[in-house]
Image (cartoon, helix red, strand yellow):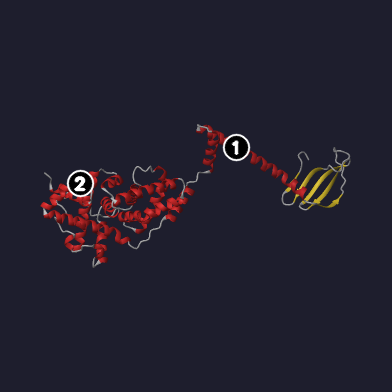
Amino acid sequence: MANQEEARDAKAEDQALVELAVGGDKKAFRKLVERYQRKIYTIAYGIVRNPDTALDVTQDTFVKVHRNLATFKGDSSFYTWVYRIVLNLCIDRKRREARQAEVDYDDAIAHEDGFTSGPTLASTGIDSPAKAAHRKELVEHMDKALATLSEEHRSILLLREVEGLSYEELAETLNVPKGTVMSRLFHARKNFQKSLSRYLRQ
Amino acid sequence: MSTKQDITMKLMAYADGELSAADRAEVEQLLAQDPSLGAELAELHSISLFAQDGFEAPLANVKVDVFDGVMARIAAEDAAAQPSAWTRLTKWLGEVFRLEHPMALAGLAAAVIAIVVGALMSSGSSSSVNAPVQDMAQVQPGPRRGMEAEHKPGGRNTAFVETWEVAKGKVVVDVNKDDPDQPMVLWHVIDGEGTSTPKGL
């Protein structure tokens, strides 16, 4: 309940800042940038996997936000609007680059089994990855496992696991039906689990 | 009858807090009946933890501060997008005269430019003709080289020619005896600029 109230307050605050920024208030725009720059960078890095490109995409995102601020009517949350912009910029950037070899799993191939049919992460004995004994090695494995996912799967995992977007917000941000959100999230998690388990077994 | 995948999807939505109260109660009943579903739920929790950490860990020490860069990029883009002088002129004319037809606007703009260019050329050429005279008028005459009285055949009897040396050359004038204050320049020589004479002489 408290979270819902906080979210409502944050949304109202964003909207007020947007209105001020549209009127030319540079401080309000700076506040919006400072509020979201880390999140945007995290999303950009999560998808493009390169710190310099991620920083460039983050700047591009806010330039685009600045240019289009007047068109933002507040029907959706400011952050879902901004997330949509950064995702599109990341996808454009990736399309321009040479495609990396990706171990991708087709969403159309249903994982008939649940999350415990193959090697599980629970069986690694790592209850809390952030406190793992071989932390550096684990971070490298997680990074490699995420890199094997498709951009679509990385995007949805990021928005759900890091940004905590609801299914409805994911549908709005990714511009897909809620059913697709569930299916894509399921496959993204399953693929991440498979890939990471493989690295952790090595 | 729900398939295994249906149950897994429902379990995932349960873990994500996305189910209605009725659906939540249904999943909790299933969890109580089937202990293997508890392991599924635990695995889903692990996947979320690992994914979250996997995304955030590489950025733990990264400082992100892009505001100045963003503003600089906006300023650079704005500067690059500045319209050309022609575009600004036509836009201004359009605003001033509120013309709706671009061809008429272009014609008007061309006429204005022609007038401006014509005026500039005209003032430029007159200044080039006048320049030596102004030059001579500005310099103080030097000592007279001499009063070379010369009767001009066919000319006025009362006139004689006088040569003045000036700082940048010399001026030959036809002085009217009756009114020496109104000499008539016959020709002048400006150092480095050649000689010019009034037409007909």
Mark 2 = which residue? B21
Quadrant of the frame with the C terminus of chain A: bottom left
Q: Residues within 10 Å of mark 2 (few under 14, many from 20)?
A: few
Q: Position of residue B36 (x, y in %)?
A: 12, 55
Disc 2 with disc 1 on a shared chain? yes
Identify residue type, mark 2.
Ala
Figure disc tally: 2
Please indicate, yes or no, whether residue B4 appears anywhere in the rendered image. yes
Identify the chain of the residue marked 1, using the numbered disc in the image: B
Q: Nearer the viewer, residue B106 or A30?
A: A30
Q: Nearer the viewer, residue A50 or B152?
A: A50
Please indicate, yes or no, whether residue A109 appears anywhere in the rendered image. no
Q: Residue at (37%, 61%) from the top-left corner?
A: B63
Q: Residue at (21%, 56%) from the top-left corner?
A: B45
Q: Nearer the viewer, residue A94 or B23?
A: B23
SS type, badge 2 = helix
Q: Position of residue B13 (x, y in %)?
A: 21, 49
